[in-house]
Structure formats: structure tokens, C-alpha cells
């Protein structure tokens, strides 16, 4: 058994049975070893940013890591942005980077570079696996590191000779760490705050915004009158009919300030104290209102859902959560806009759907509102702010959940970062419907330009935010990668196309031509 | 004057008047400042890998840097692979990375990451510019650092408040360093070797493979009988009718060994001693034959063309260089293959063309041979081995050389890394003809799989190298980005389409359907 075979066998034994890959020569023994471990599924992608984003989407839905296979420093660079998003979203990923053979590195060949310095940007766990004999054990440790808590991107750098030499040893799964129970005194202290008369809010994120945590949080809010807030870009929010609703903190600091206005206590539940996404001249970076104390109920290493249950018990809130009722908007008619498109999505979203949302000035504004009462579904957000996440995350989520429909809400600007995802969706026969909001603009930047204090921008500046000249035709681009695609310019067309797309197996794309809001 | 304005004014004063950009919020003041410095040209791209590759192509042709503008750590990650190629090719690039405002960094906002650790992978010169007052001077120093010699990627990291605060000061251009003259004793020593009876070769690269260096090298070879070799993937090779020809060292070690067989002396002229691109089990990494001594005539900090002139003088070779005569192949007929397509290119390549070559199992094999006697042109190679370079380099070369035709020879696999380049070619009205060799395969990896010792690969391994299922249709993808595109399946069709494309202004793409060689 060579090193590569021991690696793949160990990964499978540890529950990692999917690898999104874009291999090169230094990874050829990993590729060859796929045939010796039938349980490992290799998913080919055309660009590394798709591999890493797909692993992110997979990890969010499977609650265990997929692996990615990348080609030396440049391949890791190509995958870095979506690993950043996974890092910020605390998603488990096994990041396998092939390297030159150990004895070849000193020759400074063309693809030689300092891989580790790049890896450190996204991974606090980085391991060079320098001997075939150790590769299995290193892999088992990588899986444990990736699982956390908190979950993270664990990077294993594998010289080619570690893969190809004999002597590989399969390692047993390492014992995983469990989330820490939250101490009774902490529960007591938070209970005391919530049962005082001072205005308070729970700010939940991470593991606390699945149905179990939301149920307890809602009971607590109903019993104590505290406000219930969700972090702005949750990794995976369970929502819809039958699930207790939660209000997401707004992206724009002005709106977030209104949501937190008057609070005296902000209780963090696997979430961080809110800060502005970017700095703006003369505006605050730290968004917690003055005079509002911040308390931690559960950190990211803690068992947040259990802490919420204990807190609910402690405040005597044993039942009585608010349940979102089933309530869809009507099918829209008339002009197609971000709003009417999202209305149509609310009208048609199937039960159990997974929504990957990267429509930053379109679906992110209207989507949550319009789908609040749709059948239960998961909502996956742009956790790290690095655009180009939506299509790959949708792809990986569909690989993880073969029996569920995935809806990808994507923007023109962001889509062009990782558009190659569409090809893998066809290759794998994934049930992903992409709604491509085309407003021919980096619309979010038009907004940001004035928010950073540029009020009279000139023609050269405006040109840098404009995606006309030439117009992108996403139906052609999609078809070029084998994805059936249609274009909608009215709400009626959009409804019909979405209904049809959701009824068909396999991927499809609807280009929604919408005016830019900004 | 704010920091951003001082930055752009300083760059322009230092001769850097082009910026390939994909900005975000933290770069909005840079974008706004474009209108205050009319000489700076902003070129919008849809993905950072296009920006960095375009800067590479621009730098190769202009012999001075373009700047790129990237968005924090993830934007730098997206641009890293082509910065790696620029680094390996010793191409000057000013790599400007926006960051959060200084006071915002401590809040660990979503896009916060360790930018510098990523930058160190590609830049030995990295500077955080923390005060508006210093930004101009930092920019002038960055330009000097980028110009070298050797030329390099210089990274300037700019917090948003450094850009937006007033107090910017324009800095004068820093005095550039000159290449070092090579000492007379070194010339004498090399002359002595070359005039001995022992078999020797000059191995030239970098600045030595432009017409001036090639002329002296050819004279030396003709006078002394030494062999003339060029590094495998030169940054910019001047060649064609009227230019002294030079033999490129082969990619495959077996062929390179034959080229160097029997040598007793290898003289390096701005080139490194040849090593294998990758390690292969049981094969040598270092390719210089046993018993062959390696000598350095000129390092990358030296004036290599002047050293060759001095050496030519010293061996008494004052004239008598070999000049490549004009000699084109006939227009091919019959089946379209990599070979007949390259024959057509040889028959039709216009004078002064710039060829960006990334057809690793197609044009890289047949292109140089078929175009050897074409009118004079430049040939740009994959310097760092990170694929996805061809289309961006072609784009940047066309921006640098408005009066020349650019021909991009690209493969299906590599093209999909940075296909977004096509959009910028339309937007900028660039005269780039892309020949897209579509063989539905990562063909080079099929070759590498057996070269690394995997002789009986299984179906799962083979699937990872196959680009059928679905077939990519590059004519649709190109049209989706506004580029006129045709498909050729016979040599006659290809000739007609190439002739027409070269006669038309603006970009176009020809999808050449060819069988996979391997």
C-alpha cells in the first residue's frame, strides 16, 4: 500500500468519502489510488475555487468534511478565497495540497513556492506529511482538527513521494472532541440578566441557528421578552414553516443600529459581537450600542444548543415557542425585479430546499422576507465576504444532499468568479437551479462608493463598477457548459421558468434580467 | 490630496500608467482617484486571476510594470497563481492590495485575514503603507523594487484609511538600479572554455533571448562551435524571420537529456541550470549531464546582452550570426489536428505578432516548429507552470501593444481557469485572436499519469482527467462574453477562420476541435 492509498482509506474510515479535485502531476498517485478505495468519490472541477467552495457547501450540509485536492501553491491560491469563506463560517474542510517530491524541492522548479505561508492564511492546522508511513495518521489527525469544535480548514501538504512510496499505514479515526458544556453559573448569570427589566437580546449564530437552538431561543424570548437576533451571514440557517423564526442583523450598520437600539444587554450564542463589514469614514466599526453590555452564553467551542435548552429551563420557558406558519406570497405578475423574482421564489420554493444565497443587492435583500413562510428549508450565506461562493456552495450542498433541491441565488458579478461550477453540476447530475440576477453592474459597489464618502464620482470610477460593455449573456455561458438555460424579463416568465426548472432533474439556470437597485 | 490620489499620481510619474483591477469596498478611494489622474488607465476585469495575468503579459511586452488592484486577502488569493507565474518569469508587477482601515482590523471583520502571509509567496518586497503621507514614497519604492534587476512582483498593502485620508504627497521616481556589468575575468574564463575543444553550450533565458542577445549568442556559436540552447519556458522569446534562431530545451527530461548529451560545459546566460519540471520516481531531477560543468556568464542581476556582446568580441566573433530566413509552411488541408492547426498558424502569422502560448500538448509541441520561419514575432510562455495564464497574458500584452496582433494559443483545460479574460478583451477592443484547442481532456495529465509510474490506471482515475461529460462549447461561452466565435473541424475551415479573424479588429475566438495526442 502506497502513501496515497493509505491516505484515502484513512479518510474514508474517518467518514470523509468525497473529494472535490483539480489535480496536477504531483497529485497523480492520489488520483490513481481512487480506484483502490471504492468508497471515495472523486468529483472533478475545472477550477480550484469551485473545489474549495463545494467543500464548504458540502461541510455545511453534511456536518462532516469533504476533502479537496489542490495542486501546489498556485492551486491553493486559486482555492484560497472560498477556503477563507469556510474558515469564517467555521466549516470543516480537509484541504489536501500536493507538493513536489521532498528531494525535488531544492531545485526550485517552476511550480516551487512556499505553500505553507499561503496555507496559514486559512488554516491554523497545517501539517507537512513527509513520510508515507505517517500519512494515514496525519490524515486522521487532520479530520479531527477539521471537525473541531470549532470546525475549521485543516491543511495537509503532501509531497509527491510521500504519496507514491510504499509503506502506507491506515490509521483509525481519532477520537473527536465534544463541544464543552456551558457552566451552570454562566446559565444562571444570563438568566438573571434576561429576567431583569433591562432590554436584552440573544444574538445567535453558528450551531445555534438550527431548529433545535432556535426552538429554545424562541421559548426564551417569549418567556423573557428579550429580542432574538441572528448574525448577518449565518453559515446555515434553518427556517421556514414549522421552524421558529429569527431576525437577521442587517448588513448596513445604520439598520443594524436600529435593530439594536436601546439594548442594555447583548447575549452572544456562538456568534461574535457585531462589527461593520467594512470601515467607513466617520462611522463606527463596532456596532454594539453604547451602554450595552456584551455577555457570552456559548462560545464556538461550546455546546450552544444545549446551553440554550438549559437557559430555557432556567427561565422557566418550557414550551411556548413561536412557530412560523406556512404562508407563501402570491405568484407575481408584471415587471421582473429583484423583489418580484424573490416573490416568485417564495411562491414556489419546494420543501426541504437548500438555498445558496449570493445575490448581494437582490436576493439578499428580498429573498429572506419573501420565503419566511415557505416550507422548511436551509439558507446558506456568504460567510466570509469573498464573492464567488454561491455557485460552488450550491454544488457541494447538492453533492451532500442528493435527495434535496438546491436553489442558487447568484449575481452577475459574483457568478463570474466561479462560473465553472456549472460544468460540475452537469457532470454530477445535480439538482441545482441557479437564478442568475443580471443587472449588469457591481451594484453593491455603487452603493459602497457613496458610503465610503465618494459623493461625486467621475466617469472613470463609474466605469469600474459597470458590467455593460459588453453585456454578459449567462444563457450562452451556461449552455456552453452543458446547463440548460432560459432568460426571464417579466415576472410571469420567471415564475413559469422557475416552476419548470424545479420540476426537472439535473441543473438548470434562469437568467433574471433585473434593474439595478442602486 | 488624499493618499489614493498621491499613489496614482506617483505611479504615473514613475511610468506606471495602467491598472488591471477588480476592486471592492476597501479600494473605492483608489477607484475614485482615477478621475483625478487622467493618465492612469483603469482596466476592469471580472476575476483577479485575469488582472494579475494581464499585468504579467503587459510587463513582458512593455518592460515596465502595470499595477493590479486587488481586494484584501481573498482577492490576492484569486490573483496568486498568475503572480506566481510573473515571479518565476521575473516580470515587473506592482501588486496593490487594499485592506481594511487600520483601526478596523482589530475587529476581525468578515474579510479580515493575514494578507502578508499570502503576499510573501510571490513577493520578496512587501510593504504595508500605513500613513497617507508615506503612500507616494512607498509607491515609488515599489516601482523601483519591481523593476529590479531582477524584475519582480512588488506588493503594496494599503489600508482603506491610508487611501482616504488627506495629506498624500507625490513622490518623485526613485533612481532605478542598472544591471551589473559582467567582470572581464568572467568573460575571459568563459571565452577560454568555448575556445577549448570540449563540447559546450550556451543556455540563454530572460533578457538574453531578445534579438540583441540572440545575435551575439549566434555569432559566438558560429565562431566557437558551441551549442545554443534556450530555457524551456522563456518569458519572452524574440524569433522568426530576421532573428537568429535558438533551440528550446525540451519539457520532457528524456528529450532535454538528448539535447545536452555529451556536453562538458554548460554556460548559463540569465538562465538556471535545467531541472525537471516535476519529480518522477526513479528519474533524475537535475538534468545537467554527469561530467558537465556549469558556469555562469550572467546572472539575473547582470547585463546579459552586454555580456554576450563582450564575449562575442572576446572570441573574435564580430559578425556572422545565423539569420532565420522567411519560410512559411503551406496552408494545410484535411483533418484538423494540433499539427495542422499549427501549420496554419505558421502559414498565416502576421508580422509583429505576439503569441501567448499555453497549449501544453498542442501548440507547445507544434507551434514553435511551424512558426520558426514566420515573420518576426514574440513568443510568451508559461513561465511558472500555473495554468490559466494564456488568456490573461494575451490580454495584457494587447493592452501594452495596441499596434500589434496578439494570438493566444490556449487549451480547453487551462482556458477554464481564467476564461473571464474574454470579456475584458471585448471591453477594451483588443486585437486578440484566441485559438482554443479543444481535445476534451487534461491531455498533459494523461501523459503525466504514466510518467509518474501509474501504468494501469483505473476508471475512476481516468475520469478525473477527462473533460467530456459534458463537452465544453467554447463558441457559446465566448459569445456569452461578447466575443465572436467560430468552430473549426477541418484544416481548411481553420485556415479560413484564422485568416478572417486576423483581418478583423477586436477579439475573436476559434474553437479548434482536435484529437487528443495522448
Image: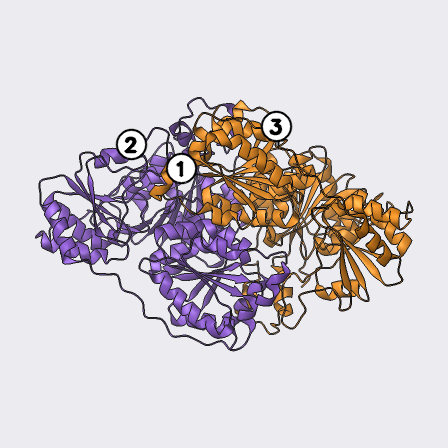
Chain colours: A purple, B orange
Find the distance from the CA under tag 1 to the CA under tag 2.
Answer: 21 Å
User: Which of the two discs, 3 and 2, sits closer to the camera?
Assistant: 3
Q: Which mark is residue A269?
A: none
Q: Farthest top residue?
A: A456
- Please say if A344 is above or below A318: above
Disc 3 to disc 2: CB gap under 8 Å = no
Question: In screen coordinates, is A507 left or right of B377?
Answer: left
Point 42% across, 32% down: residue = B161
Residue A29, image quadrant:
bottom right
Find the distance from the CA under tag 3 to the CA under tag 1.
Answer: 27 Å
Q: Position of residue A318 (x, y in %)?
A: 10, 54
Point 59% across, 57% down: residue = A112
Question: In screen coordinates, is B369 left or right of B55?
Answer: right
Q: Which mark is residue B13?
A: 3
Q: Residues within 10 Å of mark 1 (few under 14, many from 20)?
A: some
For disc 2, the chain is A
Q: Residues within 10 Å of mark 2 (few under 14, many from 20)?
A: few
Q: Which residue occupies the foreground of this view, A371 or B79?
A: B79
Q: Residues within 10 Å of mark 3 (few under 14, many from 20)?
A: some
Q: Identify the residue under disc 2.
A: A254
For the residue labelled by badge 3, is the local secondary structure a helix, a strand or a loop? helix
For disc 3, the chain is B
Q: Quadrant of the C terminus of chain B?
A: bottom right
Point 9% across, 51% down: residue = A315
User: Which of the two discs, 1 and 2, sits closer to the camera?
Assistant: 1
Q: Which residue occupies the foreground of this view, A351 or A380?
A: A380
For disc 1, the chain is B
Q: Position of residue B399 (x, y in %)?
A: 64, 35
Amino acid at each position: 500500500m502506497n502513501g496515497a492509498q493509505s491516505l484515502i482509506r484513512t479518510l474514508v474510515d474517518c467518514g470523509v468519502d468525497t473529494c472535490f479535485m483539480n489535480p496536477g502531476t504531483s497529485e497523480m498517485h492520489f488520483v490513481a489510488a481512487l480506484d483502490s478505495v471504492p468508497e471515495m468519490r472523486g468529483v472533478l472541477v475545472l477550477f480550484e475555487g469551485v473545489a474549495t467552495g463545494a467543500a464548504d457547501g458540502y461541510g455545511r450540509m453534511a456536518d462532516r468534511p469533504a476533502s479537496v485536492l489542490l495542486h501546489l501553491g498556485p492551486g491553493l491560491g486559486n482555492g484560497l478565497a472560498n477556503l477563507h469563506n469556510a474558515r469564517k463560517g467555521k466549516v470543516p474542510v480537509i484541504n489536501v495540497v500536493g507538493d513536489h517530491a521532498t528531494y525535488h524541492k531544492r531545485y526550485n522548479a517552476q511550480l516551487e513556492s512556499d505553500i505553507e505561508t499561503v496555507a496559514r492564511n486559512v488554516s491554523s492546522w497545517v501539517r507537512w506529511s513527509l513520510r508515507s508511513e505517517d500519512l494515514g495518521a496525519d490524515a486522521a489527525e487532520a479530520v479531527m482538527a477539521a471537525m473541531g469544535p470549532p470546525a475549521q480548514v485543516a491543511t495537509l501538504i503532501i509531497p509527491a513521494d510521500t504519496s507514491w512510496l510504499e509503506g502506507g499505514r491506515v490509521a483509525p479515526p481519532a477520537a473527536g472532541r465534544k463541544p464543552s458544556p456551558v457552566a451552570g453559573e454562566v446559565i444562571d448569570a444570563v438568566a438573571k440578566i434576561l429576567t431583569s427589566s433591562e432590554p436584552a437580546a440573544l444574538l445567535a449564530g453558528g450551531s445555534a441557528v438550527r431548529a433545535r437552538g432556535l426552538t429554545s431561543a424562541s421559548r426564551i424570548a417569549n418567556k423573557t421578552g428579550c429580542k432574538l437576533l441572528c448574525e448577518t451571514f449565518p453559515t446555515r440557517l434553518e427556517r421556514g414553516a414549522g421552524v421558529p423564526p429569527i431576525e437577521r442583523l442587517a448588513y448596513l450598520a445604520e439598520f443594524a443600529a436600529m435593530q439594536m437600539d436601546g439594548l442594555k444587554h447583548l447575549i452572544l450564542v456562538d456568534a461574535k459581537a457585531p462589527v461593520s463589514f467594512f470601515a467607513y469614514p466617520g462611522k463606527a466599526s463596532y456596532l454594539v450600542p453604547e451602554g450595552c453590555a456584551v455577555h457570552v452564553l456559548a462560545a464556538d467551542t461550546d455546546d450552544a444548543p444545549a446551553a440554550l435548552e438549559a437557559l430555557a429551563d432556567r427561565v422557566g420557558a418550557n414550551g411556548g415557542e413561536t412557530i412560523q406558519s406556512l404562508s407563501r406570497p402570491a405568484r407575481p405578475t408584471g415587471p421582473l425585479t429583484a423583489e418580484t423574482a424573490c416573490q416568485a421564489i417564495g411562491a414556489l420554493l419546494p420543501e426541504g430546499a437548500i438555498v445558496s444565497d449570493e445575490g448581494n443587492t437582490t436576493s439578499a435583500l428580498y429573498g429572506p422576507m419573501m420565503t419566511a413562510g415557505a416550507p422548511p428549508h436551509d439558507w446558506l450565506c456568504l460567510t466570509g465576504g469573498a464573492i464567488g461562493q454561491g455557485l460552488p456552495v450550491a454544488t457541494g450542498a447538492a453533492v451532500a444532499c442528493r435527495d434535496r433541491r438546491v436553489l442558487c441565488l447568484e449575481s452577475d458579478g459574483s457568478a463570474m468568479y466561479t462560473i465553472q461550477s456549472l460544468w460540475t453540476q452537469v457532470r454530477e447530475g445535480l439538482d441545482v437551479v441557479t437564478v442568475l440576477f443580471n443587472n449588469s453592474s457591481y451594484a453593491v459597489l455603487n452603493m459602497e462608493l457613496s458610503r465610503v464618502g465618494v459623493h461625486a464620482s467621475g466617469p472613470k470610477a463609474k466605469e469600474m463598477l459597470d458590467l455593460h460593455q459588453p453585456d454578459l449573456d449567462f444563457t450562452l455561458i451556461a449552455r456552453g457548459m452543458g446547463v440548460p438555460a432560459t432568460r426571464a424579463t417579466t415576472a410571469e416568465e420567471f415564475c413559469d421558468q422557475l416552476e419548470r426548472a424545479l420540476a426537472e432533474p439535473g441543473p438548470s439556470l434562469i437568467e433574471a434580467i433585473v434593474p439595478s437597485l442602486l
